[in-house]
């Protein structure tokens, strides 16, 4: 079992990172949140991993911290959910919101994730609610993992909000779209100019 990889990220492609450990380059499938956060770090870093071995392939999945990996493992124990679907779920909402939705039986929020139907969301709640719910469940997750950095909640200017909406309409997850817009914004830009700059830097 490959528990982790230490190296530099040399390529990014949607939900995939190429981690160069020096002698070998590993293709690692990650959530959108992990791809975005890890791609901002230029130096060598360690990524936690899960290796799926099938008859026809070996797939490596990566996580930015123990917390994300823990939720991934719990999701893959739910009937009908494999590693790819678990990554889709982790890409659809921040970890805190996923946990909160499961614990509060918020089917609507879970089923809002692209690719996750209502029946599957109901099954997730049914099978994980007791495991994640209550003080023991939540405290276990929090105490056995690194804290996830909180994004500062600040009022975004109109241009950033407009650019974020455009990027989301193009298939980019909202959290990532917002971060891209904020990173590329310069005072005095129009929303249209900001979108053009964001798209140019994404290429």
Image: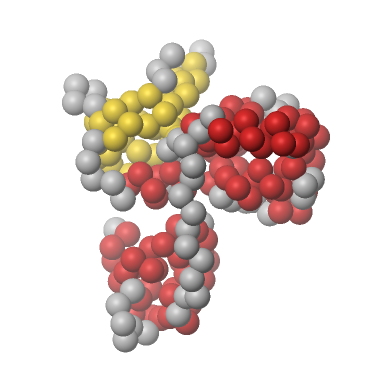
Relative to residue 125, is residue 97 depicted above or below? Answer: below
Q: Where does the image place residue 123, in percent across and percent down from the top left? A: 78, 35
Q: Which residue lies at the image location 57% right of the left edge and 45% below the top edge?
A: 95
Which quarter of the figure is the N terminus placed in? top left
Q: Quadrant of residue 122?
A: top right
Which quarter of the figure is the C terminus placed in? bottom left
- Position of residue 197 in the picture relative to residue 57 (left or right): left
Q: Which residue lies at the image location 33% right of the left edge and 80% below the top edge?
A: 193
Q: Residue furthest left?
A: 22
- Position of residue 143 in the picture relative to residue 137 (left or right): left
Relative to residue 146, is residue 168 depicted above or below? Answer: below
Q: Nearer the viewer, residue 90 or 12?
A: 90
Q: Where does the image place residue 154, in percent across and percent down from the top left? A: 48, 71
Q: Would residue 63 be visible to someone looking at this image?
A: yes
Q: Quadrant of residue 141?
A: top right
Q: Where does the image place residue 61, in percent across and percent down from the top left? A: 45, 30
In this rendering, the count of numbered labels is 0
- Position of residue 24 in the picture relative to residue 106 (left or right): left
Q: Where does the image place residue 31, in percent across and percent down from the top left? A: 48, 42
Relative to residue 201, is residue 42 depicted above or below? Answer: above
Q: Would residue 82 be visible to someone looking at this image?
A: no
Q: Nearer the viewer, residue 23 or 72?
A: 72
Q: Which residue lies at the image location 77% right of the left edge and 47% below the top edge?
A: 104
């Amino acid at each position: 079992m490959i528990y982790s990889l230490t190296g530099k990220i040399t390529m990014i492609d949607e939900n995939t990172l190429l981690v160069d450990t020096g002698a070998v380059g590993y293709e690692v499938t990650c959530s959108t949140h992990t791809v975005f956060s890890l791609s901002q770090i230029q130096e060598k870093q360690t990524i936690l991993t899960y290796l799926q071995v099938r008859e026809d392939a070996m797939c490596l999945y990566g996580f930015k911290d123990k917390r994300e990996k823990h939720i991934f493992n719990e999701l893959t124990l739910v009937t009908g959910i494999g590693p790819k679907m678990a990554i889709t779920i982790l890409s659809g909402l921040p970890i805190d919101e996923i946990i909160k939705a499961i614990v509060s039986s918020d089917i609507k929020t879970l089923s809002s994730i692209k690719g996750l139907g209502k029946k599957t969301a109901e099954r997730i709640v049914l099978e994980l609610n007791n495991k994640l719910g209550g003080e023991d469940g939540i405290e276990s997750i929090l105490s056995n993992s690194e804290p996830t950095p909180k994004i500062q909640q600040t009022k975004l200017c109109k241009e950033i909000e407009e650019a974020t909406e455009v990027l989301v309409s193009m298939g980019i997850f909202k959290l990532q779209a917002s971060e891209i817009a904020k990173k590329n914004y310069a005072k005095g830009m129009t929303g249209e100019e900001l979108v053009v700059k964001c798209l140019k830097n994404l290429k």
